[in-house]
Amino acid sequence: MRELFCDSVFFGVLLSVSTYELGVFLKKKYKTAVFNPLLISVLLVIGVLLVFRIDYNVYYEGAKYLSYLLTPATVCLAVPLYEQVELLKRHGKAIVGGIFAGVLTSLVTIFVCASVFGFTHQEYVTLLPKSITTAIGMGVSEELGGMATITVAVIILTGILGNIIAEAVFRLFRIEEAVAKGVALGTSSHAIGTAKAMEIGEVEGAMSSLSIAVAGLMTVAVASVFANLI
């Protein structure tokens, strides 16, 4: 079985897609946030690689083709934003202010954690881009001297966590405004949070799509300043 997996060019793609589809099935069946398709897929892929002792590079050789879709998929998020452009014009200042507050909160939180737990500079800058999309976060991490592979893992975990707890947080703090929900999800949980925002509503999805891009640009500009603090 191991040899069959290792010799197959499509092993990585097949494993990634099939485990994700299983996650989608479980989410629809049980309607529970814990059954996040991406989380299920990640855990199952790790399990298969460990059980059959398959090297990650073998898996990646097939799965890497899926990563090529990341950039165009992110660009496509501009479509719902275009459809809600009038809403953006009406709430422009509030939206930009909310995104900046989210970016600043994320960076300050990492700085405080790094100071309390005694992170090295490399560990600290690795975590700084945790709330922005992978396409931007990897570049920020490498530029600041962080470990890009760890950054990717942290970004994914941040997105999954935001996707899972979003609705509970909105209920807890009685957040009912669609624009606020979208900005919060896009700023804190990037594309994975945006997937949840689109499930909640069209306006939420559009605002979250905008927040991904703006939060990424803000983080690129501000992260270099925070990087010099430790």
Image (tube, helix red, strand yellow):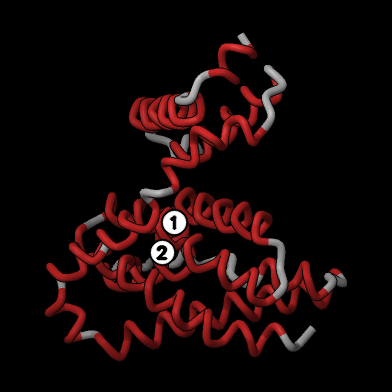
Q: Work out whether 55 lies above or below 230.
A: above
**Quadrant in the picture for residue 184:** bottom left
Classify mark 1: helix, strand or loop: helix
Q: Position of residue 115 (x, y in %)?
A: 82, 78
4 relative to 176 in the view: left or right: right
**Mark 1 Cα-neighbour bin, 10 Å: few <14, some 14–19, many ≥20:** many
Q: Taking 44 as reference, is 225 above or below it?
A: below
Q: Is residue 32 left or right of residue 75?
A: right
Image quadrant for the N terminus? top right
> Looking at the image, is 82 positioned above or below residue 22?
below
Q: Is residue 115 left or right of residue 228?
A: right
Instruction: Residue at 68% x, 73% y: name it.
Output: 110
Q: Which residue is mark 2?
A: 185
Q: Nearer the viewer, residue 156 or 76?
A: 76
Nearest to the observer: residue 67 or residue 123: 67
Q: Looking at the image, do the residues carrying marks 2 and 1 touch, with CB atoms under 8 Å apart?
A: yes
Q: Which residue is mark 1?
A: 166
Tell me the amino acid under the disc marked 2: Leu
Please name the residue shown 31% across and 66% down the image: 209
Q: Residue at x 34, y 60 (%)?
A: 74
Residue 41, horizontal then vertical, whole percent:
50, 33
Q: CA distance from mark 2 to mark 1?
A: 7 Å
Precedes in sequence: disc 2 or disc 1: 1
